[in-house]
Image (cartoon, coloured by chain):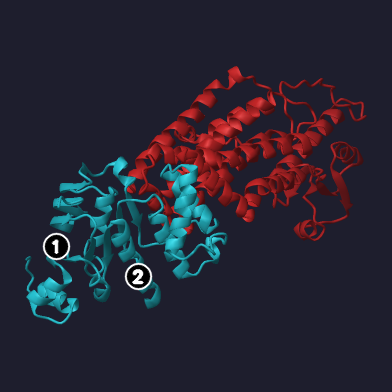
Chain colours: A red, B cyan
Amino acid sequence: MRISALIKRICQQMLRDKRTLALLLLAPLFILSLMYFIFNGNTVEPRLGVVNINKSLIQVLKNANIEVVEYQQAANETIIADKLDGLLKMNQEKLELTLQNSDPTKSKVLLMKVNQAAALQVKSSQNIPAVVPKLPNVETKYVYGNSETSFFDVLSPILVGFFVFFFVFLISGIGLLRERTTGTLERLMSTPIRRGEVISGYLLGYGIFAIIQTIVVALFSIKILDIVLVGSIWNVLLINLLLAFVALSLGILLSTFAASEFQMIQFIPIVIIPQVFFAGIFPLEGMADWLQSFGKIMPIYYGADALKGVMYKGWSISQITDDIFALVLFAAVFIILNTFALKKYRKL
Amino acid sequence: MEPIIKVDQVSKSYSKKLVLDDININIEPGKIYGLIGPSGAGKTTLIKMMVGMENADKGLIRVLDKRMPNLEVLQDIGYMAQSDALYNELTGEENLKFFAALFKLKKSEQKKRISYAADLVNLNHELRKKVSAYSGGMKRRLSLAVSVIQDPRILILDEPTVGIDPELSFSIWNELQRLKIEEGKTIIVTTHVMDEAAKSDFIAMIREGRIITRGTPQQLIESYQVNNLEGVFLKAGGRNSCE
């Protein structure tokens, strides 16, 4: 009964705070849509200026999806003035490539393509038939996804989990902090309510909104943004829900150590941002061992792994039990710590 | 009469600084007991111990014959902190309802108590407004209403009249007198305003964690041969002695 009073009060408060509600429900959709459009933009062909290059090589370059611009003479200034990504010159029988390199990924792609083209060119000039050889036809198969898979497909499961985590963390943390600073939590603790009841009330009260948010975000990304979902949507909801509860209990816990809303925001670069690095957006395999084990203390590491598994790779629940177990463990630890943290307000 | 609150040789320190030093207080039922002293004297710490929010390092606190902290006893304590501690997004009525539910009042009783409490502080026409639209004085009155919602036998109020206008402060003291006389409640009030303290039945003056003197206002003024409680405080504190 006390728990239900708490839940009712949290719902009343949230429903009257339209802006916070909008932040919880609409902001993730806005950001996800934005990322969807950003990542699904068309790839631009690199522009390459050429000086003194023979026709057959130019043809090979063009075949490799490079926009070729021919010059009589060109220098570094030309690259900048004409917005070229690179400039290829023939200098005393040697090829010389100058890259603009304001975008290293683009440079690497261009470098690779020019190297391939040059190698092909050399081969064909030695093997008398001066015809441009066709690239050998390799039949490509994919374990996960298909040739249409974009980076966004791999990224989006992680993003869905991350946004659920981030917004629930923020709102529960600040919500509880406000109770601490206005003294309502202290007053609450001057009633015969048990500490466990307080924590359960908050978890369930904010949990309702976390559930709604999880469903909205998951459905929006799958049905409207058409994010790849190979596995079961129920597993997606389960993982997101667990992530939300971890975020909820962590937010409540960290609000103990903040004296103001501003100090709560200060936890974002310390607690939230590092988790992004270990969520699988950046490849984890290349990281140093100590760094990898550091990633394993972060809840999003497990959530993202499970979400990527279910949504992209079509894993079943039996393949994500470890991740689920880890998330449950995180939530349980934070909840227990929370009941102890409440001793600050009442010794029993 | 058997004391309703018994503070027995209580000491408390925060990070090695002694906040309360060997405090002994017996509070009789049906009286207004004033704890007087400057800010930082340890008044708030002392009443937080009576509610069970803090533990004593040494000594014992018994409320209604139970050793504190004790959850059951909290049903019989109405506590009002220095801050108003209300939910601004909710209406006055919703605030009262919420706290009534925490004390597990039955639905019918809830209604009765809410209208009683609102009546006590003259807020029955403002109950449907959101607290964020209340004035400072209205918030303080609602806060007082919350503290009597479960019909507690003991009221513990921490600086109930700080930062409000004299008229409202006067009316709050009138309400406290009424609660004492008509309902026999025991009321513990902290304050640093000496004039108000004179309205208590019994006073303990606290300074730097020690009780420097105690008695009824009349007794104190007579025994220190001064005109008012301020004089008592200065004289008692100046001699740096306990009674």
| Amino acid type for the residue under numbered disc 2 | Val
Q: Quadrant of the C terminus of chain A?
A: top left
Dot 2 falls on which chain? Answer: B
| Number of marks present in the image shown | 2
Q: Identify the residue position indicated by label 1 in the image.
A: B210
Secondary structure under tag 2 reads loop
- Mark identifier at residue B162: 2
Residue at image coords 78%, 56%: A79
Residue at image coords 77%, 42%: A94
| Amino acid type for the residue under numbered disc 1 | Arg
Q: Give the crowd class for mark 2: few <14, some 14-19, many >=20 residues within 10 Å.
A: some
Tell me which corner region of the image, top left, top right, bottom left or bottom right, holds residue A65: top right
In the shown orientation, is residue A36 left or right of residue A329?
right
Is residue B102 in view?
yes
Front residue of B179/B196: it is: B179
Residue B172 against residue A91 in the figure, above or below: below
- Mark identifier at residue A262: none
Secondary structure under tag 1 reads strand
Residue B32 against residue A70 in the figure, above or below: below
- The mark closer to the camera, 2 or 1, is 2
Q: Give the crowd class for mark 1: few <14, some 14-19, many >=20 residues within 10 Å.
A: many
Dot 1 falls on which chain? Answer: B
Is residue B85 in view?
no
In the shown orientation, is residue A333 left or right of residue B8?
right
In the shown orientation, is residue B100 left or right of residue A63?
left
Front residue of A248/A182: it is: A182
First in sequence: mark 2 vs mark 1:
2
Residue at image coords 54%, 64%: B125
Q: Position of residue A193 (x, y in %)?
A: 39, 42
Front residue of B79/A328: it is: B79
